[in-house]
Image (cartoon, grey):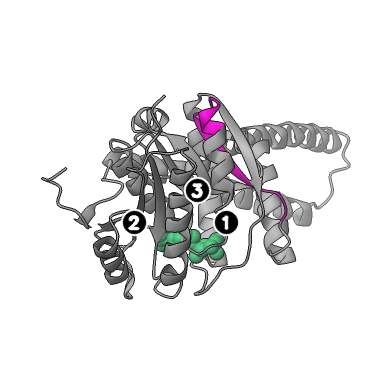
Amino acid sequence: MQKPILYIVIPCYNEEAVLPITSGMFLEKLKQLTAQEKISPDSRILFVNDGSRDKTWEIICDLAKADEHFLGIAQSRNRGHQAAVLAGLMEAKERCDITISIDCDGQDDINAMDKMVDEYLSGSEVVYGVRSKRDTDTFFKRFTAEGFYKLLAAMGVEVVFNHADYRLISSRVLKEFANFKEVNLYLRGMIPLVGFKSSSVYYERHERLAGESHYPLRKMLALAFNGITSLSVKPIRMVFFTGFIIMCLSFVGIIWAVVAALMGKSVAGWASLACIVCFMGGVQCLFLGVIGEYIGKIYLEVKARPRYIISERTWDEEET
Ligand code: UDP
Ligand code: MG
């Protein structure tokens, strides 16, 4: 069997501090896998510059000049991690047999790639990198992240527990995935929808080697929220059921009020009435908000704007 061509896809946003350290590690891993005859010598490392404002793109261009194993593409502006990964995967899919997406900060253990490639060679088309423990996370991050995976599962979204965006995907799966046209991206929830044989490998996640995280709580919450609303309509259904329960309770309340009035026991129920009115006002606003969220999503989807725009490549497109 011919050895598969591997493309390691690495999104980079303002990573000038960490790229000089990790680029060498990735190259070494690629050479090691090639030497073990697991992958083809045509395998490459593909950096995706996500509109960095520092020297990241210059570093990528220098790397590409210095070693043919390094390639780079640049997005026309910052579009976020998910779009950067997607751009890299879509760019790679015509040129390789398998891709592995990984962050550039050295947090994910690159040695898990060996097992990922082994899993591919034994028949898996998608291999999820799963964090075996979260020792390096703060209690808050661990608690919120694990709680979120459970919430997603409760919402009916199929996700692999404790898996982020470190995974191997075959180009065959990517070609099918290219037909998923949505602009609201939540890759870890979308890839399982494509199907095909999949498996998981476990690894330990370390601290960032240098630089700092670009995922503040605000961005994390936005991604989490997007994950739910992009992949599940359960919140709308819950709105419906809550409305239904409130309606039933109100019905009982109305009967009680009528009976009490008929029996001449009606009280001056101003306070209870005011409470109910306020409560209902709140509930309605909340529910309109949930529905509005979905309408907003539809609005963004129908516009079907491009999900990424590649402005530069380290290679000449006509040549290839
Ligand atoms: N990243 C990106 N675009 C962004 C933010 C982040 O391409 O707008 C990249 C970043 O360079 C890194 C990966 O996404 O390779 C994960 O980001 P980070 O390490 O900051 O997140 P954390 O690991 O702290 O969740
Ligand atoms: Mg990181």
Nearest to N terminus: mark 1 or mark 2: 2
Picture quadrant where residue 259 is located = top right
Q: Give the magenta-colored segment's residue range.
A: 119-133
Q: For the residues carrying marks 2 and 3, which lies nearer the camera in this image? A: 2
The percent coordinates of residue 250 (x first, y second) are 73, 36
**Mark 3 element type:** helix
Q: Which residue lies under the disc numbered 1?
A: 108
Q: Can you tell me whether the CB of the residue at mark 2 lies under 8 Å from the nearest atom of ligand 1?
A: yes
- Spatial CA span between label 1 and label 2: 17 Å
Q: Characterize the local packing of mark 2: few (<14), some (14-19) or many (20 or more) Cα atoms within 10 angstroms.
A: many
Q: Amino acid at mark 2?
A: Val
Q: Amino acid at mark 1?
A: Asp
**Mark 2 element type:** strand
Q: Which residue lies under the disc numbered 2?
A: 48
Residue drawn 28% across the image and 35% down it: 94
Using the rendered image of the protein, determine whether residue 239 is visible from the camera's viewpoint: no
Q: Characterize the local packing of mark 3: few (<14), some (14-19) or many (20 or more) Cα atoms within 10 angstroms.
A: some
